[in-house]
Amino acid sequence: MGRDLTVFMLDWGELSAIPVEHRIGRLEYIAWPGEFGDAYDGRDERAHGWLWPPETAPAWCAAYSFLTTTGAHMPHVRAGAAWADMRPLVDTPMREVMDSFLGGLIWDEEQANTPAAAGGGGVFLPAADPWHPHVLLVCLPEAVAGKARAWERVEPCLEELSGAFAVECEGWSGRPDSFEGFVALLREWGAVVVEAARREWGLVGLP
């Protein structure tokens, strides 16, 4: 049974007001289930997109349900590994903007075949066990804004990656099953960063 990934979009000011030692617990309380848990009770398990708290609760945080992954972390790992493989075959301008978009979300330059892993950057307390991290990603609001700008440039050019995907990823274990699936996941991440940037919020991913 693999690790899951829950991605939160949240108001950084509200998060910062919570004592650092209680931040992860607060987000976990919201998600499984908690303060906003009633909003999710009885929802269609196939539902995807942003899951918001009830109107009576302060809407400073929402969780994103990925249609293409059913909550699992491994598809994001595989997509990040696919990009690591494909990068050398992609023209420099596209490679740079893809790096800007995916870096810290599902890929990091220093990690060849592993997912982007957040150290917390002072936003959260460090995990005692590196194999069981408290957080999988932390993206500050200013970084989210940059990723939204990168996505605007990436989205019209996604089909240009098909050749590199076919050469480096198609049919390989540990990579996305298809180019269409890879692109579908990127589009979901695009929707995530665009909405978070619109609100000037940040992103946090918990296992």
Image: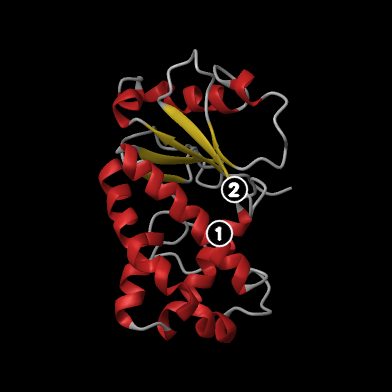
Which structural element holds mark 2?
loop
The percent coordinates of residue 205 (x first, y second) are: 48, 42
- Determine which of the numbered discs, if any, sits on residue 66 in the image: 2
Amino acid carrying label 2: it is: Phe
- Can residue 119 be seen at all in this image of the molecule? no
The percent coordinates of residue 45 (x first, y second) are: 72, 38
Q: What is the quadrant of residue 49 in the picture? A: top right
The residue beneath circle 1 is 185
Which structural element holds mark 1?
helix
Residue displayed at 29% across by 77% down:
93
Quick check: 58 left or right of 17? Answer: right
Residue in front for this viewpoint, 64 or 140: 64
Whole-Å distance between the Cαs marked 2 and 1? 8 Å
The percent coordinates of residue 59 (x first, y second) are: 43, 23
Pointers 2 and 1 in contact (C-beta within 8 Å): yes
Q: Quadrant of the C terminus?
A: top right
Q: Residues within 10 Å of mark 1 (few under 14, many from 20)?
A: many
- Determine which of the numbered discs, if any, sits on residue 92 in the image: none
Residue displayed at 40% across by 41% down:
203
Q: Residue furthest top?
A: 56
The percent coordinates of residue 117 (x first, y second) are: 45, 51
